[in-house]
Image (tube, grey):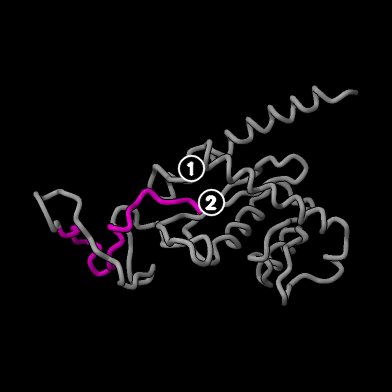
Amino acid sequence: MLEASASLKGFIPRESEDQDPPDSDGPSGRNADVNFHGKKRSNETHVSKVDPESRLAKKGKGKEAKLSYGGHLMTENRNGVIVDTEVTTATGTAEREATALMLERRPNKKRITLGADKNYDTRDCNKTCRKNNCTPHFACRANTSLAARTTRHEGYAISQRKRKRIEECNGWMKDIGLLRKLRHRGLSRIKPMYTLGAIGYNIVRFCNIEAFWEAEPV
């Protein structure tokens, strides 16, 4: 989840999208004092005045809802290097849609496995993986879409351990790559900045990998 460069004060009803927000106090141009507490707002009825492509979303139950985008990464398991990025609007299906995009544009179609959390364990995402010569290694829901012949193999257990390393990439890009709070608006500007953050992470990762192998005794 990437926090958009937009304030909730500017999250206005869609019918007033083309109108300037009211200036409740002081000279014209002053930031309006907006009281939205107790009012129901959703992406269906409201839109951000300054960043219409951002969406109101929250990371989990009990968390604060913020105007956000979805940042998605694909890494290889052996060294934790980022191999693809995608940025989407923050919707409930964005993770699986981004997965389909990244799988379809792989430069080669050799068989791979894909480790991911329970949000990906759906029949549609399973079908997308199989279509792209990929064996899904998702964390299982109660009514999982994965066959027992997939989850019983040692490779599945390895994928479940390795998939959590992607949080290291997310953490670095947000804290060191300055992507926790976005500085740009709109997908066309945010996508290249997110990819640039991934490139920065990979450079650091490559240096660490090289230093590790130089230190290892032959």
Q: Residue at x 52, y 43 (%)?
A: 174
**Left-right relation of 137 to 55:** right
Binning the other alpha carbons within 10 Å of mark 1 as few (below 14), some (14 to 19) or many (20 upward) gives: many
**Left-right relation of 127 to 184:** right
Q: Amino acid at mark 2?
A: Gly
Mark yes or no: residue 162 visible: yes
Q: Residue at x 73, y 47 (%)?
A: 108
Q: Position of residue 29 (x, y in %)?
A: 14, 48
User: Quadrant of residue 49 in the image?
Assistant: bottom left
Locate the C terminus by quadrant: top right
User: What is the spatial separation of the Cα atoms under label 2 and label 1, in whole angstroms?
Assistant: 10 Å
Label annotation for residue 134: none
Along the line of sight, which residue is nearer the eye, 107 or 218?
218
Label 1: which residue? 179
**Left-right relation of 145 to 185:** right
Query: Please, is residue 3 above or below residue 210 in the view?
Result: below
Span highlighted in magenta in the image: 1-22
Label 2: which residue? 71
Q: Residue at x 55, y 50 (%)?
A: 86
Give the mark toward the camera: 2 or 1: 1
